[in-house]
Image (cartoon, rainbow, N blue to C red):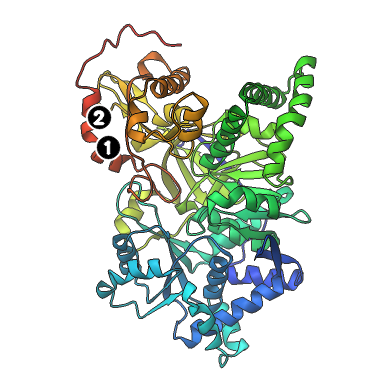
Amino acid sequence: MSALQFDVPAIVPADPTSNVADLLAERVAATPDRPLFAVPDGANWRDISASEFEKQVISLAKGFAAAGVQPGEKVAFLARTTYDWTLVDFALFYTGAIMVPIYETSSSTQIEWILSDSGAVACIVESAEHSERLAAVRANLPLVEKVWEMQAGDLDRVSAAGTDITDAEIARRRSIAQASDIATLIYTSGSTGRPKGCVLTHSNFVELSRNSAKALHEVVEVPGASTLLFITTAHVFARFISILNVHAGVKTGHQPDTKQLLPALGSFKPTYLLAVPRVFEKVYNSAEQKAETGGKGKIFRAAAHAAVEHSALLQEGKRIPLGLRLKFRLFDKLVYSKLREAMGGRVVYAVSGSAPLGPRLGHFFHSLGVTILEGYGLTETTAPATVNLAHTSKIGTVGPVLPGVGVRLAEDGEIEVRGVNVFKEYWRNPEATAAAFDGDWFKTGDVGTFDDAGFLTITGRKKELIVTAGGKNVAPAVLEDPIRANPIVGQVVVVGDQKPFIAALITLDPEMLPTWLGNNGLASDMSLADAATNSKVRSEIQAAIDVANGHVSRAESIRKFTILDSEWTEATGHLTPKLSIKRNVIMSDFADEVEELYAAPINTTNISLP
């Protein structure tokens, strides 16, 4: 018996014959001349209409068909987030094939596992460097008959070779798949072991897109709606949004280099954004440090405080005091307007997922005029299961259940999901599939709570709960998220399972650190190793920990920490492609550092906290 459950009926009736290719065909029929994409053109952007996009899709699909790709066969794809990614995606749908996306940062070993386990017969890569990684394991992949490299011009050659394939043949191929058939095979990021292949069906994407478009109509169904994608389309989050945009007619641009994100936002001027919390933290921290450098740090902090206070009072339905209203108007001219302009000046909504955002950032951006619609989902739920809506949202929650979806809480608080978005099974892994379901309910492994209005709050991962030697249950995210918000913190992992107290491993952010060092009278080129032992840096980290400790009881508070002299990145194997920490890998690689934290006992009964 579940503790609490919310089921929301679908708004759009399910169609058992529809597949993802139909979404594009329907968009072209409805608005053939509407700009569906924009691609970089010098300092500007060049629009590509719905009909032009489909023309390119059909041309490439003919090429794949001529190359021997058969309906139902799997084709792997390893590339960055660009226009060509979605072009290939829909071309494979029109071919009748099944795409197996691979993160472009994947190692040769990871590439080999995904290609081997999926049974892919071909692979498309973006660059020569990607080709080299694949070549290193190609001998172990006898099923992979063809490899195409985009930057070598192979896609143009594939399209050129397909001129003998008829339109009728592509129309036949794109119509073969039914709603219940596999649309794509997406491998989990592997934060808890070897990646598992999630079988997502056409109905998962089609029904979720159709219902989400209605639920989020103020975001995606308004005239001139546009977004700039920069998180990887190999991940289900951006993949779903790119398909939703085609269905809803949203103009999409791409920027794979996040270091070029602000200039791209300035020229593209999107109306909504899709991002993970780390991006919002970077925007805030960069603005704060820039203000500090210009001698306006005090003004920025006052503006940020006023922004959070103003938004929180609005959400609670309370009266805004006159003094705060006057401050807000002043800061809107001095600070908020400049940040709005830096994001292109037209952003009204931002969809956030993959990790908790935190109320502070939610309220701050809300005061900028950007409503962050935080949502929750997994690869297994085709991305969103819940999301805050334009007309009903609560900062600090991940929103209500989407139409066509049901969410319930098990007796231990575990979140379980069923509905149009839930995947079919784990590929060639019946044991894992059986373990993941209770009837038709998918067991997410996350723990959460509902409020009376049906807004879900995530409190942590079930498997990541730390139980101290004293028997205290501690959810790491409650401590980690506030610490990670500090500008010089890269990543943080809270430890203490079966230990006498809670402690933390912390890495520094090499991008933000030089500016902070300079602003604090230290050498901006100080190495990570030297910074890790610097007294001012350690005081700053202690201040961040004090803030986090203020959210929990004394028994749950962090008593000791160590700053590592290295980074945790995707390349080092410590972060997933969506920048989530691989806790098990970190605990293994830094076991000595963890033990050292507990080598010298401390008095855990008489510690004063802020």
Task: Give how far across and how far down residue 479 sits, in percent.
Answer: 43, 26
Residue beneath the point at 68% across and 22% down: 306
Mark 2 and mark 1 lie on one chain; the one further toward the N terminus is 1
| Left or right of 39 in this view: 557 | left
Can you see residue 131? yes
Three-letter amino acid code at the position of disc 1:
Met
Three-letter amino acid code at the position of disc 2:
Val
Task: Give how far across and how far down residue 528 sits, in percent.
Answer: 36, 35
* Quarter of the rendering containing residue 136: bottom left
Task: Give how far across and how far down residue 213 sits, in percent.
Answer: 67, 54
Binning the other alpha carbons within 10 Å of mark 1 as few (below 14), some (14 to 19) or many (20 upward) gives: some
Q: Which mark is residue 594?
A: 2
Q: Relative to the observer, which residue lies in front, 157 or 28? A: 157
Q: Relative to the observer, which residue lies in front, 402 or 24? A: 24
| Left or right of 164 in this view: 97 | left
Q: Relative to the observer, which residue lies in front, 195 or 84? A: 84
As drawn, which residue projects farthest toward the bottom? 164
Residue beneath the point at 68% across and 60% down: 43
Residues under numbered marks 2 and 1 in contact, where contact means CB atoms less than 8 Å apart = yes
Compared to residue 479, the image places residue 94 above or below, namely: below
User: What element does badge 2 sit on?
Assistant: helix
How far apart, in angstroms, are the residues tagged by discs 2 and 1? 8 Å
| Left or right of 549 in this view: 33 | right
User: What element does badge 1 sit on?
Assistant: helix
Compared to residue 45, the image places residue 600 above or below, namely: above
Residue beneath the point at 41% across and 24% down: 537
The residue singled out by tag 1 in the image is 587
Can you see residue 19? no
